[in-house]
């Protein structure tokens, strides 16, 4: 099944969702029926959600630390979302708005945005400061994902 993990900002639970079904109708939380904040296969998450998903995801997790005022972030966002569909069932894609959720960005010492960090088993594997194009991001992830 082409699944991905998503996170419900309303009831704070992690959802494993069938990606094809999520594309055909509004993806909702299996627990509380709130709409999931899903953009292609990328879930926009809060500080608590990021902490949770890093602890619990059985897949590697990639995070886009961004802000809405940041021009390179605006350009990078759709690229990140596009690439997310190529890693269903192999990488969990999330993004976090560092303006509203500064805690995790600070704890990982994110200095500039956008900043992409890959985690395995809750630990940082590597990071890339600045935007990447789709091919670069895909290759960057594939180096670590077999
Ligand atoms: Zn929920």
Image (cartoon, rainbow, N blue to C red):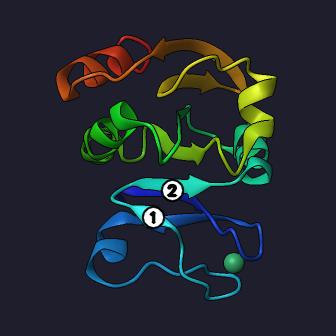
Which label belongs to residue 38? 1
Between 60 and 73, the one lying in front of the other is 73
Q: Which residue is mark 2?
A: 43
Residue at left offset 21%, top offset 29%: 134
Split into quadrants, the picture shows ligand 1 in the one at: bottom right
- Helix, strand or loop at mark 2: strand
38 relative to 104, above or below: below
How many numbered discs sit on the rendered protein? 2
Instruction: Give coordinates of residue 103: x percent, y percent.
Output: 81, 38
Instruction: Give coordinates of residue 6: x percent, y percent.
Output: 56, 60
Which corner quadrant of the image does residue 108 belong to? top right
Q: Earlier in the sequence, mark 1 or mark 2?
A: 1
Q: Is residue 53 left or right of residue 61?
A: right
Residue at left offset 33%, top offset 59%: 40
Instruction: Give coordinates of residue 116: x percent, y percent.
Output: 49, 25
| 10 Å crowding of disc 1: few (<14), some (14-19), many (20+) | many
> If the image is split into quadrants, where does the C terminus sit?
top left
Asked if the residue at tag 2 contacts the one at tag 1, i.e. Cβ–Cβ closer than 8 Å, the answer is yes
> If the image is split into quadrants, where does the N terminus sit?
bottom left
Q: Is residue 117 left or right of residue 55?
A: left
């Amino acid at each position: 099944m082409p699944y991905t993990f998503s996170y419900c900002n309303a009831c704070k639970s992690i959802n494993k969702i069938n990606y094809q079904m999520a594309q055909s109708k509004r993806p909702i939380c299996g627990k509380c029926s709130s709409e999931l904040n899903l953009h292609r296969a990328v879930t926009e998450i809060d500080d608590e959600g990021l902490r949770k998903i890093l602890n619990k995801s059985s897949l590697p997790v990639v995070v886009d630390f961004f802000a809405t005022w940041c021009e390179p972030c605006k350009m990078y966002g759709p690229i990140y979302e596009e690439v997310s569909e190529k890693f269903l069932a192999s990488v969990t894609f999330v993004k976090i708005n560092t303006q509203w959720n500064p805690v995790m960005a600070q704890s990982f010492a994110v200095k500039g945005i956008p900043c992409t960090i890959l985690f395995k088993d809750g630990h940082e594997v590597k990071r890339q400061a600045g935007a990447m194009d789709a091919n670069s991001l895909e290759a960057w992830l594939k180096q670590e994902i077999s």
